[in-house]
Image: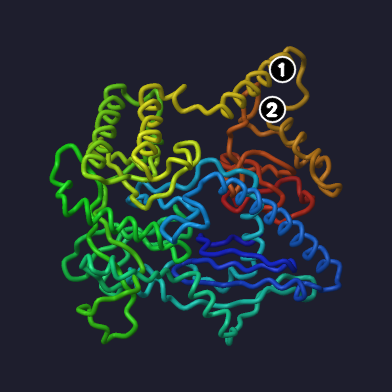
Amino acid sequence: MVKLPEYEVLNFCFDNDNGCSLTVLANDERFHVTVDPKQLQDRSKEGKVIQRRYRRLLKRAKAADQDGEEQEETTQSGNEDDSDQDSEKQDSAVDVSSPETEQKPEDEDGSSKHTNALHRRILTPLSEHILSKPSGSKPTVQDWYYSPIHYYNLSTSSGKLQVQENQSPPKSLTERMNEILIPTISLPKKTLNLSIPQFSASDLTVLSCASDPAPYHPILVSHNDNNETYFLKPVDPTQPGPTIREIDIMNTIAKKDLHSRDDFRCPQLKGLVYFSSSSSDSSTIEHKHIAAILLSPIADPTPLTRLLDPSTPEHKRKQWAKDAERMVEVLHENGIVWGDAKGDNFMVDKDDKVWIIDFGGSYTEGWVDEKIKETEEGDWQGTGKVLTALEDPVGGTMSEEEEKRLDGEKEEDEELEGEEQTPMKSSPRKRSRDSAAEGEDADEAAPPAKQQKRSRQSAGTKDTRDVKYCFCESTSSGRMLACDGKDCKREWFHFECLDIEEAPEEKEWFCEECR
């Protein structure tokens, strides 16, 4: 199996004709791969297998995307009939984080597994065209976003999956990719009249990047002249409203000198970032189109939601609750509505001080009711839930759905305890894999003996429902292959992630990390 270099997904989409395209950043280079089913019609036996695998992975990725859209509908920010400022449908939260604290989702579900498997399948033949290691240079924000894209087409020939570079991609494609990958919005005259400092993207050096919120983007930058460090928050071209609202509110906070108070902490708005159209583009000209806003960074921030745990000292939780409540009071005393009150919009710095962030508005279901969004009442509804969770990290953070789920898990545990009284012929991991396999297609029925090999660490009655395996770092599901490496950290691998349909005939098999 080909070992892929580390990569970050910049964009992924598919059409109604079983085609798709994937854009990634790998070792400082951008690659765009187009998959046209017509180019996968190799009639050889191996070619048909490739086509069948692709269609299966695409089908599951589409299903995963549909599930994600349904979940995303639970986060709203206004009615579609409202103005741009009120019609945004995504949470505009800003994660003012440093690279040390930026983390990927800990619990990657099955839907992500299927999408990642398709990505790996598409990128495998591209690996030989990717540099073996990053360049090591630190680009400017301008260069990072305007980095050239290498265009490739995926196809099959003689039973092999291959890519062919497209030296002359259609103009419509290159323009479309620029629209997707290069963030920019137009500011209204009212916002421009605030006279906020503007910075050229060519004068800012990228120090680190983050993938949350998606897509992967620069997060920490420094100015080339004074080496001052800023947090960079790119705009979202699909929803300019939150950015405009945030600029307006943060400017109001600065004018009211709230940053000088001991009982209020939020990042300071340092400036707006624009892309230079030419080397002679003057910084003295007011630019209507901006790419990002610059904020003062929070030192080693941690989202408050990650600290809602009984292990967090009670005296810290009490102080955070007191400070959080007071900061919302300060906003309201100055005629400012926060707009998206929730746990993730409080950050705790390296000195255990709590900060309030994100003034882009919107609301998040489960925290604030839609009918009171962007009101003081809504602010207190969301903040009240944060205060409750700080007081009781267990009961205060549990929704009705979670309570039902835990009740179901309790019943399941009781059933498992009953089963453990009788001799077991398989480990808990094997049992979970077998049950998952029952729901697969006919060609993914009961796994062979090699596939069912019991993991060394699963002996006994250990609960493995939350154990992560494979490259995708997800729980056990479907058909999986065990690595024979004595100290393998991943142990089991999904057939899809390995891009295989049957277990290898060899008596021993080692993953790429154990070879």
Residue 20 versus residue 101 in the image, above or below = below
Please state the horizontal and vertical placement of residue 317, each as a whole percent of the image: 31, 27
Query: In what element is the residue under mark 2?
Result: helix
Could you tell me which quadrant the N terminus lies in? bottom right
Amino acid under disc 1: Glu
Of marks 1 and 2, the one in the foreground: 1
Question: Which of these two is toward me, 66 or 231?
Answer: 66
- Say which quarter of the image contains residue 416: top right
Q: Is residue 130 visible?
A: yes
Residue beneath disc 2: 428
Residue beneath disc 1: 415
Please state the horizontal and vertical placement of residue 404, each as a whole percent of the image: 61, 24
Residue 431 versus residue 475 in the image, above or below = above
**Which residue is depicted at the point 86% across and 67% down?**
45
**Which residue is depicted at the point 71% across and 44% down?**
481
Please state the horizontal and vertical placement of residue 274, each as a whole percent of the image: 31, 72
* Crowding at mark 1 (Cα within 10 Å: few <14, some 14-19, many 20+): few
Scheme of colours in the image: rainbow
Amino acid under disc 2: Pro
Please state the horizontal and vertical placement of residue 336, each as a whole percent of the image: 27, 46
Q: Earlier in the sequence, mark 1 or mark 2?
A: 1
